[in-house]
Amino acid sequence: MLVSFDIDCGYLLSGHRFIARGIADDGLITGENEEPYPGFSFEYELAPGVESGEGAGEGIGPFLVGIEYGADVALPSVPADGGAIAPFVGGPTTRGTRGSWPLPRDARLLKFVLYGLDAGSSWPRETPDGVLTVDLQSSEATFQQIS
């Protein structure tokens, strides 16, 4: 992990708390201009873990919280909106990851605007639920809930 943290961001989707765990080094990735730059993935867990019958036939879509990523400097490319979630087997948590996203070499702060899922449609809400800020110099993260 580049930066590890343990921040409970609340119920961003029905029946599961979204717990931000850290950002993981993805090594060098290639963007739109084919120039390699550092990349990372955003790591999280859903608690309790997602049961095998939840969202049956709907894939991972109903479990991917909306995330807008930015930094205190310009990004070297537009962030892709990829993601993966561990198999749905229940338990205390289900791990998930988003990215790989570009990490500007001179970035100091990363910002993740989190949008919970509308229970009726499984689409991200129009208004954000909170902002997670990661300070790369101090390796600290904070979450500011938006009321």
Image (cartoon, rainbow, N blue to C red):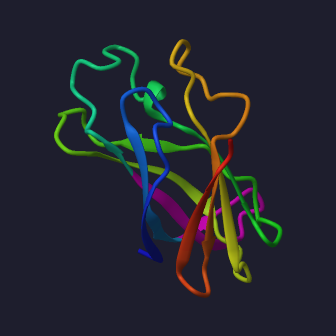
- Assign the C terminus to one quadrant of the image: top right
Q: Residue at x 57, y 22 (%)?
A: 118
Magenta-drawn segment:
28-44
Where is 64 relative to 93, above or below? Answer: above
Q: Is residue 41 magenta?
A: yes
Q: Residue at x 41, y 29 (%)?
A: 60
Q: Residue furthest front?
A: 147
Where is residue 76, by image quadrant? bottom right
Where is residue 87, by image quadrant? top left
> Horizontal placement of 146 versus 4: left or right?
right
Q: Residue furthest bottom?
A: 137
Instruction: Give x and y (percent) for residue 7.
Output: 45, 60
Q: Is residue 24 magenta?
A: no
Instruction: Give x and y (percent) for residue 135.
Output: 62, 77
Q: Residue at x 78, y 62 (%)?
A: 33
Instruction: Give x and y (percent) for residue 103.
Output: 65, 70
Where is 17 relative to 100, above or below? Answer: above
Instruction: Give x and y (percent) for residue 69.
Output: 68, 54
Residue 81 or residue 13, whichever sits in front: 13
> Horizontal placement of 84 versus 64: left or right?
left
Q: Residue at x 73, y 34 (%)?
A: 127
> Horizontal placement of 85 versus 32: left or right?
left
Where is residue 89, by image quadrant? top left
- Assign the N terminus to one quadrant of the image: bottom left
Where is 86 relative to 14, above or below? Answer: below
| Prevailing secondary structure class for the magenta stretch in the rendered image | strand
Where is 102 relative to 81, above or below? Answer: below
